[in-house]
Every structure is written in C-alpha cells, then in structure tokens.
Image (tube, rainbow, N blue to C red):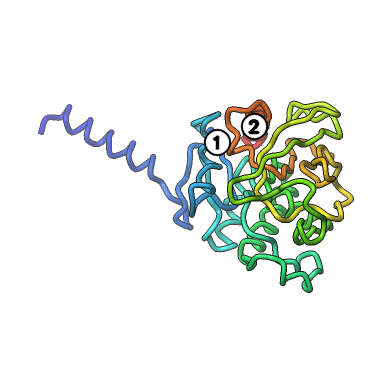
Amino acid sequence: MSIKSLYFLLLSLILLLSACRIDENNFPIKNENQIKLAITKAHGSTGYEQYKKWILHSDSTIEIYDLYDLSLDSAKKIVDIVDGLIISGGPDVNPGRYNEDSLAYICEVPDNYRDSLEFQSIGIAFNKKIPILGICRGQQILNIYFGGSLIADIPTKHGTQVSHRSKDGAEHIIIMQTNNALMGSNINDTIMVNSYHHQAINRLAKAFIINAQSEDGIVESISTDYPTFFLGVQFHPEHMIDTKVSQTIANSFILSLKQQSLKNK
C-alpha cells in the first residue's frame, strides 16, 4: 500500500470514528451546531410518525429524539440537552392526575409511564425555558401539570353540539379569543381544524390564557407568559401541513428552536 493510500485510509477512519462517537451512556454525540428536538412519542403508528414528518417538512436538518420507551433517567438526559419539546397526542391521561379517579370508567386505559414521562419532561423543559408545543393530549397534560383539570368525556359531560371525534374524522371551526402570532391569527378569526379527541380542558390552569375555542366552548388553544415559544393546541397541525395555521405554528416553533440553540452554545 502506498503512503498516499495509507494516509487516506487513516483519515477516513478518523472521520468515521469522530462521526460515531458515543457518550458514557451510549448516546450518540451529535453535532453541537445541529438543532435538537425531543418528542414525547413519535413512533408506533403512522399518526405518531407524522410529528417527525411535519417538522422535517419545514426543516430537514433538525435532529429529533423520540423519548417513548426510554427509561425516565435516559429521557431526562435528552430533555436536558435539546432545544425544544413537543408533547404529542395519544391516550387519555390518568384521571388520578387531576384528582378525578371516579371518572376512570369513562376514560381510556391510561398509560401511566407516558404520564410520568411527560410530567418529567414538562418540568425540565419549563425550568430550562425552552420552546414547548403541546398537541391534543399534549395541551391537556400541560393544563393538568400546571393545576388544571379535564372534561373526562365530552359527549357525557359537555354535550354534542359540535362533533369533536368520529370514525371518519371530525372537522369544525375554532374562534380566536386573542391575537396570537404563533398561530398567525387575530381575535375573532375563524379557522377550520381537524378534531380527534373526546376529552378537553375543564378547569383552566391559572398560568394560561385561552387563545381559541370551538363554537360549543371547548378550549382549542392555550398559551402563557413565557420568554420563548409556548403553545397548546387541541387540534393536530401535523395533519394539516398545507394549511396556513399549520405552517405558521411549525415555522414559529422552528424559529424559536434555532434561537434557543444559539443561546445554548
């Protein structure tokens, strides 16, 4: 082998090893300049996988960490290093989390691990003041974490003036209650959204304001005073990629991730 060939072989090995470095916990060491995002669950079905597709549709360079199935300790270490958090949709939160154990009979079987994972992740993210986006269940558990409660079953406890979930997929309008740049909408604007839930916010946590409601009064979006992006939505913007509201939320969130990444350097 010639000296030149040996040189290129050694250089290739060095580059390969540096690209595949791992830390003491066997986590890959990523490029420090790359935007890092944690999603509490982003696998297991096409619906869960859509969260990644939605974000990568707007910026394909973002490094996404899926927290579900990790130990709570491993998930904590990831949330400690990321630039933002998405709390994704999913099954009902255990009603014991908002002191309504008696309502378990009208709730889905809870995923207690998921509840613990998201409570832990919200706490870390909020203390770090990194961008937070809660979608559907994500909005609901944000409200619970900060002291609010849920309507355990909309048809039973609230009524059916508006269809919020159906086998064929429901749609309805929401009415903006505030001017919210993160959604690109102003007070009294109406937006058509999808709807896949049978639970919703009941008692609003004191930390939050209502951005939007459905025509029957269901809370469709919340926010709070926060130094960076903080938004909860009851609908699923990841399934509305071609709409203005979906694109505005994605772009606003990604911009905040980039700004947070600069702060973390």
> Vertically, is 122 above or below 221?
below
Of the pair 212 and 157, the residue shown nearer to us:
157
Q: Compared with residue 61, is residue 200 higher up or lower down, i.e. above or below? A: below
Q: Which numbered circle lies on residue 246?
A: 2
Q: Nearer the viewer, residue 2 or 80?
A: 80
Which residue is label 1 attached to? 54
Say which quarter of the image contains residue 241: top right
Is residue 228 depicted above or below 135 in this figure? above
Residue 181: percent from the left, percent from the top? 77, 27
Of the numbered discs 2 and 1, the one sitting upstream in the chain is 1
User: Could you tell me which secondary element the residue under label 2 belongs to?
Assistant: helix
Of all residues, the one furthest to the right in this rendering is 206
- Image coordinates of residue 195 in percent, x first then y, are 67, 44
Callout 1: helix, strand or loop?
A: helix
Name the amino acid, label 1.
Answer: Trp
Location of the C terminus (image quadrant): top right
